[in-house]
Amino acid sequence: MADETAPQTSPETPYAAMGGAETVRALAHRFYDLVGSDPAYAELRALHGPELAPIADSLAGFLSGWLGGPRDWFESGRGCIFSLHGAVPIDHRTAGQWADAMARSIDSEPRVPPQIAEKMKDTLGRMARSMAPREAAAS
Ligand code: HEM
C-alpha cells in the first residue's frame, strides 16, 4: 500500500534529469560509433568483435541502471562490470581510449546537464582506467 506520508519530492535521478532511455541509448551508441570510426580508437576497436551494435545496447542497459533508471541489465545475471571484462586484455592505452571516447560522447549530448556530465566523465573515466593493470615501476 502506498505510504501517503512519504515525501513526494524524492530527488530526481541523473537518468531522469537527462531525459531517460532515449538519451542513454544515444550516449551508448554515439560512444560505439566513435570507437568504430575514429582511428584514434583503433586499438580499442580491435579488442571487440565485428558487431558493435549489440554491445552498445548492453552498455545502454548498464548505464540505465547505473544512472538510477531501470535496472534490467543488473538483474539479467551478467555479473559485475569489472569481472565481465576479466578476459579483455585492457592496458592503460586502450583504457584511456575508452575514457576519451566516452567523454566525447557525453560532451556531444546536450540533454545531459553539465554537472552530471562532469561527474559521469570523471567516474566512468576512473572506472575504465582502473580496469588496466598498474604499470610496472620503471627500473
Ligand atoms: C566504465 C568502464 C566500462 C564500462 C561501463 C563498460 C561496459 C561494457 C558493457 C556493458 C559491455 C557489454 C557486456 C555484455 O553485454 O556482454 C562491454 C563489453 C566490452 N568492453 Fe567494456 N566497459 C568499460 C570499460 C572498458 C574498457 C576500458 C575496455 C577496453 C580497453 C573495454 C572493452 C570491452 C570489450 C572488448 C567488450 C566486448 C567483450 C565481448 O566481446 O564480449 N571496456 N563493456
Image: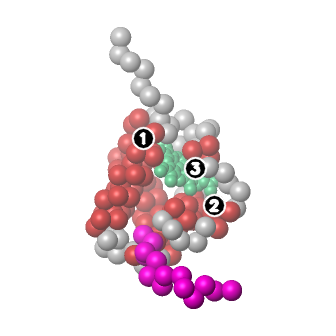
User: Which disc, if any, is residue 81?
Assistant: 3
User: What secondary structure is the stretch in magenta mostly built from?
Assistant: loop
In magenta segment, residue 13: yes
Q: Position of residue 12 (x, y in %)?
A: 43, 76
Q: Which range of residues does the magenta coloring cover?
A: 1-14
In this image, 124 relative to 85: left or right?
Answer: left
Question: From what the image shows, is residue 16 above or below residue 83?
Answer: below
Query: Can see residue 23?
Result: no
Estimate the spatial distance between the alpha carbons at disc 2 and disc 3, rounded to whole Å: 9 Å
Furthest residue toward left = 114
- Residue at horizontal 40 percent and vertical 52 percent from the top: 123
Relative to residue 68, is residue 119 depicted above or below?
Answer: above
First-in-chain label (3 vs 1):
3
Q: Residue at x 35, y 71 (%)?
A: 112
In this view, the residue farthest toward the right is 77
Q: Disc 1 designates what residue?
A: 129
Respond yes or no on whether mark 1 lies under 8 Å from ligand 1: yes
At a point 70% along the width and 61% down the height, the residue shown is 76
39 left or right, relative to 49:
left
Q: Amino acid at mark 3?
A: Ile
The answer to whether mark 3 and mark 1 are in CB contact below 8 A is: no
